[in-house]
Image (cartoon, rainbow, N blue to C red):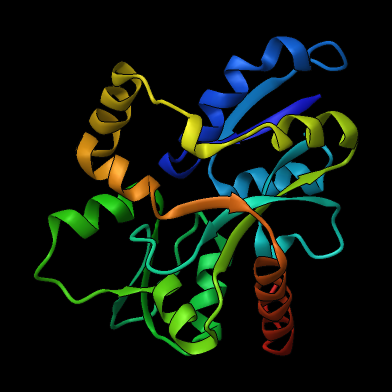
Amino acid sequence: MIFAKIDFINLLPFHIFIKKNINSFQQKASIEYKKSYPSVITEKFKKRKVDSAFISSIASRDEKFLDFGIVAHDDVLSVLLIPGIEQSDYQSKTSNALAKVLDLKGKVIIGDKALNFYHQNKEIEKIDLAKQWKNKYNLPFVFAVLCFNKNEKSLNKLTKNFNKKQIKIPQYILEQYSNRSGVSKKHILEYLKKIDYNLGIKEKRALKLFLKLTKEKGLR
């Protein structure tokens, strides 16, 4: 199975987990990592160039997915809007759509660069879009879901064994991500506490609401 990888800090615990468990998973499939950002991976998945991937929520409509994704229960720090002239972030359609659903105008910035911006620019006004969603709807926000075209059983077995609390990130990997992103190791670890991966009743309700609101606004 070809598994596409979003190479952002928010999925670091899962990437470490999957590497440690890849041998058992290979009994039924082989995994090829194709690194990129959300919008590119979504396009590859839609064209069936990859078998499974974390797909941007707005693009998950009508796709098969597990009870697994990228979730924020409150502020997330890595999906920001700087009030002012409207400007989308090419890396994520979901975050751009979220700003529109919340009727907010400004520059959208996501991912590791947003996390770095948050810590390096304390004096600049910025809006955490996940926090705004929580304030308005009292629900978590689902940024992406793990979609699949095949190998559902194997993928489900893999994710069921994932427990974020049991994942220890090696110092050398933290160092790599810190050097690449400009975010300190301390801030990376603090940030990961804000990220969840399980889709329960509230998360599914939130996803359904987001897809309903985007459809009403003609966003895809």
Q: Residue 152, percent across and down?
A: 88, 37
Total labels: the figure holds 0
Above or below, 62 against 4 in this view is below
Q: Residue furthest front?
A: 166
Assign the C terminus to one quadrant of the image: bottom right
185, 215: nearer the viewer? 185
Query: 115 left or right of 186?
Result: right
Q: Residue 184, percent across and down?
A: 19, 38
Q: Residue furthest left?
A: 123
Q: Residue 215, can we see it?
A: yes
Q: Residue 51, can we see it?
A: no
Assign the N terminus to one quadrant of the image: top right
111, 105: nearer the viewer? 111
Query: 195 left or right of 177?
Result: right
Residue drawn at (55%, 33%), measured in percent from left and top?
A: 14
Query: 100 left or right of 219?
Result: left
* Figure quadrant of residue 177: top left
Residue drawn at (29%, 81%), measured in percent from left and top?
A: 83
Query: 17 left or right of 32?
Result: left
Above or below, 43 against 76 in this view is above
34, 149: nearer the viewer? 149
Residue drawn at (74%, 29%), measured in percent from left and top?
A: 158
Q: Residue 96, percent across and down?
A: 51, 70
Above or below, 92 against 17 in this view is below
Q: Residue 35, percent across and down?
A: 56, 31
Residue drawn at (65%, 43%), measured in percent from left and top?
A: 41
